[in-house]
Image: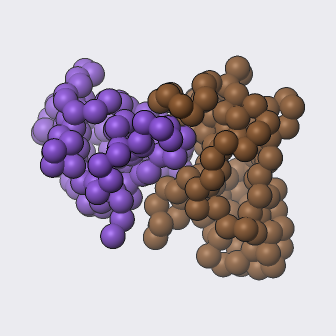
C-alpha cells in the first residue's frame, strides 16, 4: 500500500464549477501538507502548503487537512480552463522536510 | 519560470549506456533535490544535496549517483541504463536546510528515453 493515495482521475468539470481534489495517507508522522500543480511538460509548482490540521485559503483555492482522518483536500472555486492541469498532493514529516512523498496526481480538465 | 534550469531537455540513449543530467539551482539556493517521475511510480524523491554535501537519500538505485559542485550546480549520473529508467527527471532547489519546511522550486525536467 502506498503511503499517499490519490485518485488519478481524469476529472472533467464545466467552467465555474467547484472542484474537490483529495488524498489519503497512512503515515501519522506527516506534518506538512502541500498541493502542487503541474502543467503538461512542465515541472510541478507549489500552490499551497499547510502545517498540521486546519484550513488555508488563497484566492480561489482552499486547502484542508484532517489529521484525525488522514485526509487532505484542495477546493478550487469558480474553476477556469487555465486550471486544467495535474494536481499532486504531497506531504512530509517535520524532521525530514526534504523527503517529500507525492501522490500520483489527479488530472483535471475544465471545460469552457 | 522557477529559476531552476536543467539540461538537456530531452535525451535518447540505448540500454547499458551512461548519461549525465545537469541542474543549476535558483540563485542563492543551497539545496538541490533530484526526482524521477514515471507513469507507474509517480514523482519519487531520489536524493538531496546541501551546499555540496549529500543530505538525504530516497529511492535512488545504486546505478545512479549525484554530486553538487562548489558553484552549487548538480549532476545526476545514470549508468547501465535499463528500459525502465525512461522517465522525467526533475531537479528542484530550495534556500534552507531540511530541518524546517521550505518550498522547493522545480526545474522544467529532462525527459530520458532508453531504447
Question: How is colour applied across the structure in the image?
Answer: by chain
Q: Nearer the viewer, residue B91 or A27?
A: A27
Q: Nearer the viewer, residue A93 or B75?
A: A93
Q: Nearer the viewer, residue A20 or A69?
A: A69
Q: Which chain is brown?
A: B
Q: Residue at x 80, y 47 (%)?
A: B67
In the figure, the shade used to draw chain A is purple
Residue found at the far left of this picture: A17
Residue B28: give x, y in percent of width and height: 70, 20
Q: Residue at x 36, y 59 (%)?
A: A3
Please tell me whether residue A80 is drawn above or below residue A99 in the rendered image. above
Q: Quadrant of the N terminus of chain A?
A: bottom left
Residue A102 relative to residue A15: left or right: right
Quadrant of the image occupied by residue B51: top right
Q: Quadrant of the C terminus of chain A?
A: top left
Residue A6: give x, y in percent of width and height: 29, 57
Residue A34: give x, y in percent of width and height: 36, 38
Q: Residue at x 77, y 52 (%)?
A: B66
Please tell me whether residue B60 is drawn above or below residue B110 in the rendered image. below
Q: Residue at x 54, y 41 (%)?
A: A98
Quadrant of the image occupied by residue B30: top right
Residue B16 visible in this rendered orientation of the protein: yes
Residue A26: give x, y in percent of width and height: 29, 57
Q: How many marks?
A: 0
Q: Nearer the viewer, residue A74 or A51?
A: A51
Please tell me whether residue A110 is drawn above or below residue B87 in the rendered image. above
Residue B39 relative to residue A53: left or right: right
Residue A79 visible in this rendered orientation of the protein: no
Amino acid at each position: 500500500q502506498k503511503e499517499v493515495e490519490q485518485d488519478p482521475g481524469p476529472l472533467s468539470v464545466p467552467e465555474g464549477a467547484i472542484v474537490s481534489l483529495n488524498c489519503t495517507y497512512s503515515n501519522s508522522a506527516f506534518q506538512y501538507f502541500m498541493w502542487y500543480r503541474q502543467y503538461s511538460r512542465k515541472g510541478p509548482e507549489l500552490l499551497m502548503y499547510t502545517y498540521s490540521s486546519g484550513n488555508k485559503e488563497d484566492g480561489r483555492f482552499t486547502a484542508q487537512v484532517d489529521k484525525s482522518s488522514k485526509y487532505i483536500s484542495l477546493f478550487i472555486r469558480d474553476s477556469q480552463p487555465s486550471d486544467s492541469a495535474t494536481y499532486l498532493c504531497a506531504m512530509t514529516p517535520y524532521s525530514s522536510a526534504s523527503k517529500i512523498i507525492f501522490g500520483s496526481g489527479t488530472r483535471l480538465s475544465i471545460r469552457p | 519560470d522557477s529559476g531552476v534550469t536543467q539540461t538537456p531537455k530531452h535525451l535518447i540513449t540505448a540500454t547499458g549506456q551512461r548519461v549525465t543530467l545537469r541542474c543549476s539551482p535558483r540563485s542563492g539556493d543551497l539545496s538541490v533535490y533530484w526526482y524521477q517521475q514515471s507513469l507507474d511510480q509517480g514523482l519519487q524523491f531520489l536524493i538531496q544535496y546541501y551546499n555540496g554535501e549529500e543530505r538525504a537519500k530516497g529511492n535512488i538505485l545504486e546505478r545512479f549517483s549525484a554530486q553538487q559542485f562548489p558553484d552549487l550546480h548538480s549532476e545526476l549520473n545514470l549508468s547501465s541504463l535499463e528500459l525502465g529508467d525512461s522517465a522525467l527527471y526533475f531537479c528542484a532547489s530550495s534556500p534552507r536546510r531540511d530541518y524546517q519546511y521550505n518550498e522547493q522550486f522545480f526545474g522544467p525536467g529532462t525527459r530520458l528515453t532508453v531504447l
